[in-house]
Image (spheres, coloured by chain):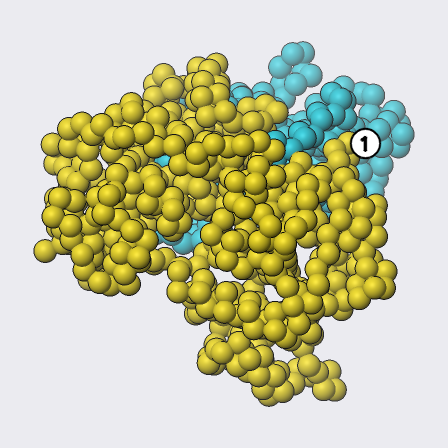
Chain colours: A cyan, B yellow
């Protein structure tokens, strides 16, 4: 409307409620209110409940950080659950069986995750395979690699000797460091790691050119290419980053279980996607943010916790979660005029 | 339609507007972007259902509450972006939503027969079983009209129907409009192109800022008065173009060929040779699909270097393999479709305006938001962009303002050579004139411009020299004094004509 009347900006509160962040925040508030009302044994007022909620949501949350980057660029990464398992197995092998120090295990694990993400990225960005297909293939491939690396068994502290007997080794220092609590036992280390991942993703998205490029590519890839945006590199890096976040999640998972399970992380990618979407990041790409994902992680995390402290059986919990995901996304829908 | 008032929230977009269409007339609905034309049409088409005022069809009051009800009342709208489904057959598209069924099963044979009947009525001979996307855009538009006729439409609304058509197809469309008139159809015609309006309008209604300005027989409305009605003031000269003062040679292209699909495939541009000087506008004429856009993409490195021949920018031999390289060398390309290839509609103005120069505005990859904002503010102000805030999403802006954002993005890269592909497509008269003024200003600052335009007056009045393309080959070169509409059109149809002093050739 070049000379037509401009719509008036609504008041601050109204605008907040209408924004994706506002709606994600309201969804989280609703969940918390439910928690306060249905408060079996006053569990909701105990700090331990919140600590455990955050701890349980953290591994998913770390995956959701990488997923946010990929989804904003207009893609999707279905491989994160399998990459988590691959890194959990490799990390456990390195830390438990080979006795490597954490300073070696962490970078090596990140390289494994980055390599898996890099392959997904190159296949989607350069070879132009649809991200859904490319990462679906990587999901199967990484699961296979996890089983190959582990020989199909959990990599635990029971190490098989050459003569077939078992000896038990200590839980490695790295795993103990990750699976610890700080602040007088009130905050789990994995939650700190998760928040650290959120911070890194936030810096990448809002402080670096790369983040702006991801939004631009997700919004309109051809316009971005013609504006000189390095589309291939930016997209590939998004998958690499997602793979590296999956590696971090894999180490956390292995540390918590004190073993590397090749079956770990199955279905985690879908929970991570749900967390991103409930936050309000558009699956079409180009819109959203890591702050929204944080709200989504908390919403699903608390929802699950509240249902479990009220002794809702797992069957009911899953069904309710499904319904609530749809309801949340419906409220997120952009108003069309 | 009488006394139509429509509000979106606090904003009144239509105020007491009245509009009518008689059988057998072309009623042009005119006004700048944002004047309320599309809102009025959407009310007529049953898309907007909340409004004040009355609608009458054949004297009986009615109020369409959905597009389907509007169809039943005899209203068909052919939108600017066609609403056909590319992968479905012509017949399926014509009968979409009204598929003839027998015992719950689609009656394919009958649908084909009837579809073929309607298509023949328009003088088309095509296989209605083929998917729509296999036909050129002009034919697709006719298929839309066939669909409208098959719905027994009494009022057909055409929203900028010629924006994607070339000259011969426009002629065909106008002939068809004549025959639709003779059948007694009323046509509502929306267009920004003066020449078209003058040719086919029987009556004209002008809207401005949501108000009805006037309705009058077309012959009573001279062009100056018409423009005054639309913009509310006298615009003065339509094409401001000072005498050019060309400087040194900016771009020289010799034997340039472009292969969008790789060198084994067909060339979109063959052996083109031309040059443009600093401060000069070289117009590129030609029909739709003659290769102008491909020439730009090739020069800009957007085909990844799948080009042959020699290109010299300020005397330096160049061969761009990516848009990034072109941008860094001072070349900018405004594409002909700002929504599909120009802008990122989901991002705010400031992000779009700085996208092409983001790396230069950042330090070592780290963004400097304050610097970005200052830069975007400066360029958008110099373009007189009208927006509530730089944080507004570009998708919410009008066409003219969107185009200004796209231009702002390229000015930010401080170009030496501007490739402008249909810079005024789909924007209103006032915004067009502003862009003409800007082009004049840029050339005065020493920027060289290559201009593609399918609007003949625009091409003839702005270009200092004109090269005409026909199927990827340059068929003519004119200086401004030599170019006439007839000569340019003849060259666009394939007739060679090289004026001696135009410095354009195609051996």
Q: Residue drawn at (69%, 16%), measured in percent from left and top?
A: A186
The x and y percentages for residue B266 are 23, 62
Q: Where is residue A245 in the image (x, y as percent from the top left)?
A: 48, 33
**Residue drawn at (38%, 19%) of the image:** B362
In the rendered view, tell whether residue B58 sits above or below residue A2: below
The residue located at (83%, 21%) in the rendering is A45
Judging from the image, mark 1 belongs to the subunit labelled: A
Q: In this view, does A139 lie to the left or right of A275?
A: left
> Residue B108, position in %: x, y?
61, 84
Residue that numbered label 1 is attached to: A30
- Can residue A227 be seen here? The reply is yes
- SS state under label 1: helix
Residue A214 in view in this figure: no
Q: Nearer the viewer, residue B54 or A212?
A: B54
Q: Eyeballing the image, is B12 above or below B479?
A: above
At which x and y percent is residue B163? 47, 54
Q: Nearer the viewer, residue A329 or B219?
A: B219
The foreground one among A304 and B146 is B146
Q: Quadrant of the C terminus of chain B?
A: bottom left
């Amino acid at each position: 409307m070049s000379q037509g009347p401009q719509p008036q900006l609504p008041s601050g509160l109204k605008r907040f409620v209408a924004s994706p962040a506002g709606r994600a925040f309201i969804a989280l508030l609703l969940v918390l209110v439910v928690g306060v009302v249905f408060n079996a044994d006053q569990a909701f007022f105990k700090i331990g409940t919140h600590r455990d909620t955050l701890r349980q949501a953290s591994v998913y949350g770390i995956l959701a950080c990488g997923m946010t980057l990929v989804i904003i660029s207009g893609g999707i990464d279905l491989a994160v659950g399998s990459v988590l398992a691959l890194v959990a197995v490799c990390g456990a092998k390195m830390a438990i069986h080979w006795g490597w120090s954490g300073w070696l295990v962490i970078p090596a694990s990140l390289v494994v995750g980055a390599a898996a993400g890099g392959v997904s990225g190159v296949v989607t960005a350069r070879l132009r395979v649809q991200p859904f297909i490319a990462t679906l293939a990587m999901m199967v491939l990484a699961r296979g690699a996890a089983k190959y690396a582990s020989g199909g068994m959990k990599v635990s502290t029971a190490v098989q000797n050459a003569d077939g007997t078992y000896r038990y080794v200590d839980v490695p220092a790295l795993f103990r460091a990750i699976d610890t609590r700080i602040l007088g036992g009130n905050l789990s280390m994995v939650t700190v790691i998760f928040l650290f991942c959120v911070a890194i993703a936030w810096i990448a998205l809002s402080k670096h050119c790369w983040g702006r490029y991801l939004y631009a590519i997700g919004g309109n890839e051809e316009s971005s290419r013609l504006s000189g945006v390095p589309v291939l590199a930016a997209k590939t890096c998004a998958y690499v980053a997602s793979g590296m976040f999956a590696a971090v999640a894999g180490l956390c998972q292995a540390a918590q279980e004190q073993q590397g399970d090749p079956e770990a992380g199955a279905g985690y990618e879908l929970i991570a996607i749900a967390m991103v979407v409930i936050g309000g990041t558009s699956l079409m790409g180009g819109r959203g943010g890591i702050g929204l994902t944080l709200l989504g992680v908390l919403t699903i995390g608390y929802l699950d916790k509240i249902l479990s402290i009220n002794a809702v059986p797992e069957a009911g919990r899953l069904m309710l979660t499904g319904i609530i995901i749809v309801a949340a996304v419906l409220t997120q829908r952009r108003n069309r005029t | 339609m009488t006394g139509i008032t429509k509000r979106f929230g606090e904003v009144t977009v239509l105020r007491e507007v009245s509009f009518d269409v008689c059988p057998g007339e072309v009623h042009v609905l005119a006004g700048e972007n944002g004047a309320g034309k599309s809102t009025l049409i959407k009310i007529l088409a049953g898309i907007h259902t909340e409004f004040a005022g009355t609608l009458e069809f054949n004297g009986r009051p009615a109020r369409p509450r959905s597009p389907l009800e509007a169809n039943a009342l005899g209203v068909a709208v052919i939108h600017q972006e066609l609403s056909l489904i590319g992968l479905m057959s012509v017949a399926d598209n014509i009968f979409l939503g009204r598929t003839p069924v027998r015992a719950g099963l689609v009656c394919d044979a009958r649908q084909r027969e009837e579809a073929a009947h309607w298509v023949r009525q328009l003088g088309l001979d095509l296989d209605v079983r083929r998917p729509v996307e296999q036909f050129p855009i002009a034919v697709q538009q006719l298929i839309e009209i066939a669909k409208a006729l098959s719905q027994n439409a009494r009022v057909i609304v055409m929203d900028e129907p010629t924006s994607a058509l070339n000259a011969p197809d426009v002629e065909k469309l106008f002939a068809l409009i004549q025959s639709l008139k003779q059948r007694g159809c009323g046509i509502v015609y929306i267009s920004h192109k003066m020449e078209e309006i003058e040719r086919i309008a029987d009556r004209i209604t002008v809207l401005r800022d949501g108000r009805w300005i006037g309705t009058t027989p077309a012959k009573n409305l001279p062009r100056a008065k018409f423009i005054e009605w639309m913009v509310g003031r006298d615009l003065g000269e339509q094409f401001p173009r000072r005498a050019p003062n060309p400087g040194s040679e900016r771009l020289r292209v010799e034997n340039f060929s472009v292969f969008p699909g790789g060198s084994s495939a067909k060339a979109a541009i063959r052996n083109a040779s031309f040059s443009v000087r600093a401060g000069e506008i070289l117009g590129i004429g030609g029909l739709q699909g003659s290769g102008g856009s491909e020439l730009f993409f090739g020069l800009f490195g957007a085909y990844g270097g799948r080009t042959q021949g020699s290109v010299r920018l300020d005397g330096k031999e160049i061969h761009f393999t990516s848009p990034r390289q072109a941008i860094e060398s001072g070349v900018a390309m405004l594409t002909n479709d700002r929504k599909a290839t120009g802008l990122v509609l989901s991002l705010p103005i400031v992000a779009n305006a700085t996208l092409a120069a983001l790396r230069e505005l950042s330090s070592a990859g780290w963004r400097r938001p304050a610097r970005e904002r200052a830069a975007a503010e400066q360029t958008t102000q110099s373009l007189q962009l009208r927006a509530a805030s730089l944080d507004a999403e570009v998708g919410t802006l009008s066409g003219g303002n969107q185009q200004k954002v796209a231009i702002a993005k390229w000015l930010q890269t401080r170009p030496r050579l501007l490739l402008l592909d249909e810079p005024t497509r789909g924007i209103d008269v006032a915004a067009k004139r502003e862009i003409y003024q800007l082009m004049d200003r840029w050339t005065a600052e020493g920027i060289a411009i290559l201009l593609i335009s399918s609007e003949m007056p625009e091409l003839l009045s702005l270009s200092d020299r004109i090269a005409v393309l026909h199927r990827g080959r340059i068929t003519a070169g004119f200086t401004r004094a030599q170019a006439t509409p007839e000569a340019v059109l003849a060259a666009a149809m394939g007739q060679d004509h090289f004026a001696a002093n135009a410095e354009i050739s195609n051996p």
